[in-house]
Image: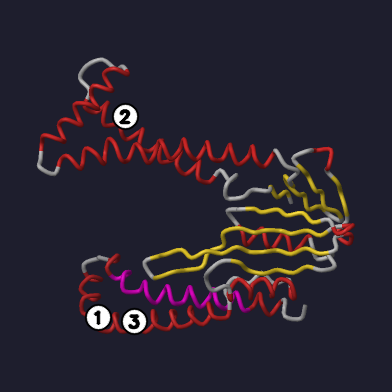
């Protein structure tokens, strides 16, 4: 498994995000231009179209001025300048990273691990038993949703202590961080002293439980114990609500069935069907857990 040393500053995530928004906004502008064009297609005519559109919004309604500023000044400034600044800041961070002796990447292989530096002459290989200590720090953050705040995995930091007590650090912002954590545990079971901790806000009990289960049992847990309890209650609520809905709307269901409106009948069974799907998922997770219980 290959892991690059990618920090928040050297990550492509911000550049890609602003790049996508830039493409979307550019396509929207060009689409509006080609839908309204009556003359020749050129850069000059496109600029004239922008000017005419801006003036039209300014003069059309009392509130048109803020619409013009948002559409043709504020949004382009955020999108295009954001993309340019993200690229420039990333290039500066990469230049600063390459100016020092930093760990560029690591390769977890069977029986050994490769340490790759930004200066190849310092690369070296060692066995897992030759690593004195490995500390994995899992960085978390809080993400706001319509239901409140939830804990998300943001980054992992690996701190290696190898022969002669030399220390190296590597950070990674993988899109599938939990899968990366499981793979790291797989490869580093031969390390003498492996520890992990958390950094950042949020409740990490679920993540901690999953890691402990995999370390001690080799079991990749889908739901934590608290998650199972929450889904059990959800299944019960959906089932009871579905039964009550079927009972109170039985006349409507009979009428819909006679009129061959099967889709209306199906809507009343969705809650009960969803309840059974959750139950099957919970049973499957328990069976998998029982399989690894003796490890």
Q: Secondary structure at mark 1?
A: helix
Q: Quadrant of residue 97?
A: top right
Q: Position of residue 263 (x, y in %)?
A: 29, 65
Q: Nearer the viewer, residue 88 or 124?
A: 88
Q: Position of residue 136 (x, y in %)?
A: 70, 63
Q: Give the class, few, some or many, for how many residues have Cα within 10 Å of label 1's Cα (few <14, many ≥20).
A: some
Q: Nearer the viewer, residue 169 or 205?
A: 169
Q: Tell me which segment is drawn in magenta.
A: 265-286
Q: Is residue 51 left or right of residue 89?
A: left
Q: Which quadrant does the C terminus fall into?
A: bottom right
Which numbered marker is on residue 241? Answer: 3
Please tell me which of labels 3 and 1 falls first in the chain. Answer: 3
Q: Which residue is mark 2?
A: 30
Judging from the image, the colouring scheme is secondary structure
Which numbered marker is on residue 138? Answer: none
Q: Is residue 214 above or below residue 113?
A: below
Q: Which residue is mark 1?
A: 250
């Amino acid at each position: 498994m290959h892991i690059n040393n990618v920090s928040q500053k050297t990550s492509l995530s911000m550049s890609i995000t602003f790049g996508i928004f830039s493409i979307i906004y550019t396509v929207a502008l060009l689409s509006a231009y080609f839908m309204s064009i009556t003359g020749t297609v050129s850069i000059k005519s496109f600029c004239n179209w922008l000017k005419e559109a801006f003036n039209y919004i300014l003069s059309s309604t009392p509130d048109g001025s803020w619409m013009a500023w948002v559409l043709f000044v504020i949004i382009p400034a955020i999108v295009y300048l954001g993309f340019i600044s993200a690229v420039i800041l990333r290039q500066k961070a990469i230049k600063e990273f390459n100016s020092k002796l930093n760990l560029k990447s690591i390769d977890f292989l069977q029986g050994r691990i490769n340490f790759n530096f930004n200066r190849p002459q310092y690369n070296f290989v060692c066995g897992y038993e030759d690593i004195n200590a490995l500390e994995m720090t899992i960085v978390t953050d809080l993400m706001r949703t319509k239901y409140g705040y939830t804990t998300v995995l943001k980054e992992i930091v690996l701190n290696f202590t190898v022969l002669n007590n030399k220390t190296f650090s590597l950070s990674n912002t993988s899109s599938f961080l939990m899968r990366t954590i499981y793979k790291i545990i797989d490869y580093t079971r031969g390390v003498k002293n492996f520890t992990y901790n958390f950094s950042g806000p949020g409740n990490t009990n679920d993540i901690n439980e999953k890691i402990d289960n995999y370390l001690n049992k080799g079991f990749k847990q889908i739901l934590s114990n608290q998650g199972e309890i929450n889904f059990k209650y959800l299944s019960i609520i959906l089932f009871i609500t579905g039964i009550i809905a079927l009972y109170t709307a039985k006349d409507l269901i009979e009428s819909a069935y006679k009129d061959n409106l099967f889709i209306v009948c199906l809507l009343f069974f969705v809650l009960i069907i969803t309840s059974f799907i959750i139950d099957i998922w919970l049973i499957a997770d328990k069976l998998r857990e029982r399989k690894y219980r003796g490890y």
